[in-house]
Image (spheres, coloured by chain):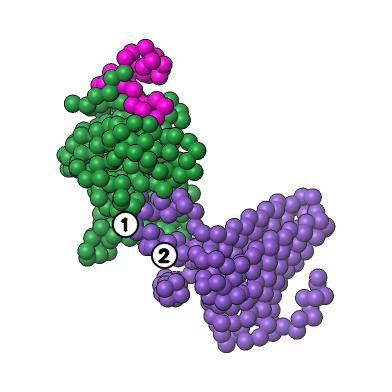
Chain colours: A green, B purple
Amino acid sequence: MNLVIKDLNVVTKDQEKEILKDFSLEILPGKIHTIMGPNGTGKSTLSKIIMGSSDYEVKEGDILYNGKSILPLTVDERSRLGIFLAMQSPISIEGVTNSEFLRTALNERREQPIGIYQFMKDMEQGMKDLKMDSSMMHRSINKDFSGGERKKNEILQLKLLKPELIILDELDSGLDVDSLKIVCDNIQEYRKENPTCSLLIITHYTKILDYLIPDYVHIMKNGKIRKTGPLDLAKQIENCGFNYTEDVSELVTNE
Amino acid sequence: MNKMSENLHLEKIVIDKNQKLILDSNKLDNKKQIVIKKGVECEIEIIEENKKIELELLLEENSNTEVSIFLENSDLTLKANLIGRDAKIKISYSNLSTRDSNNHIHIYHKESNTRSTVYCNGYSKKSSSIHFDVNGYVEKTSKNCSCIQDSKIIEEEDSKSQINPNLYIENYDVEAAHSAYIGPFQKDEIFYLESRGIRKEKGIELLVRAHLLGKLKLEEEKRSNLIQRIEKNRV
């Protein structure tokens, strides 16, 4: 999977706020990219824009998925194409069970509906891998789930829906150290089985990068990538803060 | 308030042991009064269409009642009198309407330590409207009561639905709350479903089903039948 964001200019739907300005980024096949940046710089918004949220309007530029523009596609079409956004704060929907939701999502991708036996087997295995209580299968989506359970539920969906581009929006928030390791192990396992799958990690902290070691770290500020480097860059940010990037010349590169 | 209840001349059902009471059309052909005796745990289920239903519940001391009602193109008047200490009631009412529907729910806390929770969920279509009047009354002598209401009407098309949530509280030592919403489904709910590859129309179908059936305590077979009815009405 290859995703290219080219000179993207995005505003909020009401046209009042500029979110991204001449934003460019390339996510390479099978690679792990990380975006770090101060609060309010547009990192989470970027993930929603890639997913196609109607809260934002692309004024200029393009997003190419394997060479084709996804801007004309709806949110569900982008998802079925292979993009998965693990959300920072997954919402709860009372009355729709996890199993009903996931089965519907799977069937939307298939010509023939998945058999109930196969589905249950896959879901049970996924929950076991993530050390989730099996009762969560029949509970409403994220209803009364803890922050950690919600994040695990996102990764369960990922495992079943089998995307090619995974965006993790602050996966580490709300997860204790043990749970973080479990979800990261599951993501790594998935990547082993799907070596062309790419990962975009949006985070404030470097702990998650101990488990999912990035090939590229991008520093984002004021709606733009300001610097790109290896894992060391994240460590420097951790030690010196985001102002560190102001002292170096802009470097926006990909191989 | 007591007198008004007594003058209704309702047909009476007395529940004196733990049980589930399913009220069908035959049992609902006139006004009905149901007495839940002291200490009894009871579930009441009503699924009907094209009916005008009037129901009065009398809850005695330490009784616990859970009511699940699904009505299609119908009107409901429900009065619950919590006449014994520690009586508890949870009402989950779902209304599917393609015509105007008027609904009045009154909860009277006549004793201390009584608890009520009322969920009213409506889905209106084709220029129909749903009216929910939900009234909670806590008398001056009723201490430490809880009176909670939550009403939501989903409209896909323009209509004139209305929710009137009222709390008439005469005691200071009370937990009381109400919320009311009329409008379409939240954008973030639809976005979440779409972000997993579910088409918007299919997502709304799931949300309507959840909205109308999520709170009701029903057997799987009845739930499946209602899903079909809901879909038929949405098309």
Tell me, yes or no, whether the highlighted magenta stretch contains residue A238.
Answer: yes
Q: How crowded is mark 2: few (under 14 residues within 10 Å), some or many (20 or more)?
A: some
Measured as percent of width and height from the top left, residue A144 is found at: 48, 49
- In this rendered view, identify the residue nearer to me: B100 or A162: B100
Q: Is residue B94 left or right of residue A159?
A: right
Q: In this view, does A6 lie to the left or right of A41?
A: left
Residue displayed at 17% across by 43% down = A193
Vertical relation: B153 (above or below) A204 = below
Q: Are marks 2 and 1 on the same chain?
A: no
Residue displayed at 38% across by 15% down = A246
Residue A126 visible in the snapshot: no
- Please give the label number shown on residue A226: none
Q: What residue type is labelled 1?
A: Ala
**Image quadrant in which the C terminus of chain B is located:** bottom left
Q: What element carries label 2?
A: helix
First to last magenta residue range: A220-249
Q: What element carries label 1?
A: helix
- In this rendered view, identify the residue nearer to me: B76 or A66: A66
Residue displayed at 51% across by 66% down = B157
Q: What residue type is labelled 2?
A: Glu
Measured as percent of width and height from the top left, residue B160 is found at: 61, 67
Could you tell me which chain the residue with mark 1 belongs to?
A
Disc 2 to disc 1, C-alpha distance: 13 Å
Residue most extreme to the top: A247
- Please give the label number shown on residue B205: 2
Q: Quadrant of residue B141?
A: bottom right
- In this rendered view, identify the residue nearer to me: A5 or A85: A5
Q: Quadrant of residue B82?
A: bottom right
- Please give the label number shown on residue A105: 1
Measured as percent of width and height from the top left, residue B194 is found at: 36, 53
Q: Residues within 10 Å of mark 1 (few under 14, many from 20)?
A: many
Measured as percent of width and height from the top left, residue A132 is found at: 36, 46
